[in-house]
Image (cartoon, helix red, strand yellow):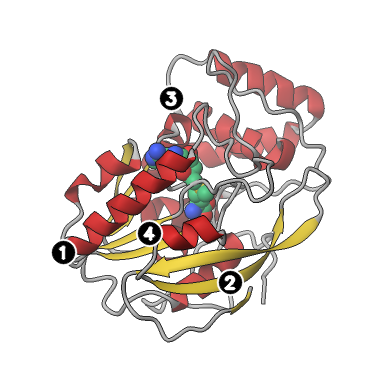
Amino acid sequence: MIESPKAPNGLYSSRVNFRGEAPIKPLLRWVGGKQLMTSHLAKLLPGGVDEGVYHEPFLGAGSLFFYLQPRRAVLSDVNDDLVNTYRCIRANCGLIARYVARHKGLDSEEHYFRVREQFNQAKYYTAAQAARFIYLNRTCFNGIYRVNKDGEFNVPFGWRDNPIFPGIRHLGVAARALKCARILSASYEKALDGAARGDFVFLDPPYPPLNGTSFFTHYTADRFSRPDQNRLAAVVRELDKANCRVMVCNADLPWIRRLYAGFNRVVLDVARYVTSHNKKHKVSELVITNYDTDVIDGGV
Ligand SMILES: C[S@@+](CC[C@H](N)C(=O)[O-])C[C@H]1O[C@@H](n2cnc3c(N)ncnc32)[C@H](O)[C@@H]1O
């Protein structure tokens, strides 16, 4: 069952995570975000996952992190604006909530472009800047994060009917979850330097294009190319040797299957918005683990 994202406190009311708590919904819209898959991914976790450190080095909207709220975590992403926003939320969620509420009251196409301009001109990452990031994310076209060659955010206005903005309760529970985490702006390889025996590593990289288009690759100025996917699979094998428990999500493509030969594999059929016309398509996604699960392939 998919619950409405409109709950004001940002919690899933009919679910509990492995710690018996109500899972938190992600604060942001993010291309490739796993919000609709989190309860399925949670069923694929290894036992004792909260005994070690939880690592999520392709953080994006952090759907699985917020769902689980692990006790100790290392979270990271190469997107500096995203990482700085989470750091600000952790430090100052009350002030950010007030700024976001003000943007909500002023929301319009004109306001969007004014905020986008201010966002691109700001010199420091303050609570006001984090609130701008959240406002732009909730109102821009398809929740895309894209910058031009000068590093300026240049996504058009989204023309959404009823954009939802996180309020103080949602930001507050998210900030509390983030207080248990180190938050790094780093490539996944660097961020995983400290991963040790017994830790759990969740890897959700940008996906390769499924059909010659590249909806899943425009997160930053850089793309995640085929050599990047090869390197990631090698890192997974290193983590496996180091006795970390690893879960990887990726597109269900023959060459991706080959990269992870020998690992446990579950196929999930996911209904995703993958076109610019907001049309839903069923796509298959692979969940690869280096431990056994008792889940069989299925729909989400
Ligand atoms: C598919 S998204 C993650 C979505 C996330 N699991 C969620 O539920 O929202 C992939 C993320 O990886 C980040 N990324 C891309 N290349 C990276 C790299 N080399 N190291 C770390 N993060 C990277 C992108 O900025 C993006 O936020």
Q: Are marks 2 and 3 in contact (CB under 8 Å)?
A: no
Mark 2, other Cα within 10 Å: few <14 / some 14–19 / many ≥20: many
What amino acid does circle 3 point to?
Tyr
Q: Could you give the CA–CA distance between mark 2 and mark 4, rounded to whole angstroms?
A: 16 Å
Between discs 2 and 1, the one toward the N terminus? 1
Which residue is pictured at 53% across the width and 18% down the height? Answer: 151
Of the pair 243 and 21, the residue shown nearer to us: 243
Kindly tell me whether mark 4's CB lies below 8 Å from ligand 1. Answer: yes
Residue 37 image position (x, y, % from top left): 57, 67
Label 3, secondary structure: give it.
loop
Mark linked to residue 125: 3
What amino acid does circle 4 point to?
Phe
Mark 4, other Cα within 10 Å: few <14 / some 14–19 / many ≥20: many
Question: Which residue in the protein does label 1 denote?
Answer: 197
Of the pair 164 and 9, the residue shown nearer to us: 164
Residue 164 image position (x, y, % from top left): 70, 49
Q: Is residue 278 left or right of residue 20?
A: right
Question: Which residue in the protein does label 2 denote?
Answer: 268
Of the pair 92 and 124, the residue shown nearer to us: 124
Question: Which residue in the protein does label 4 denote?
Answer: 202
Mark 1, other Cα within 10 Å: few <14 / some 14–19 / many ≥20: some
Label 2, secondary structure: give it.
strand
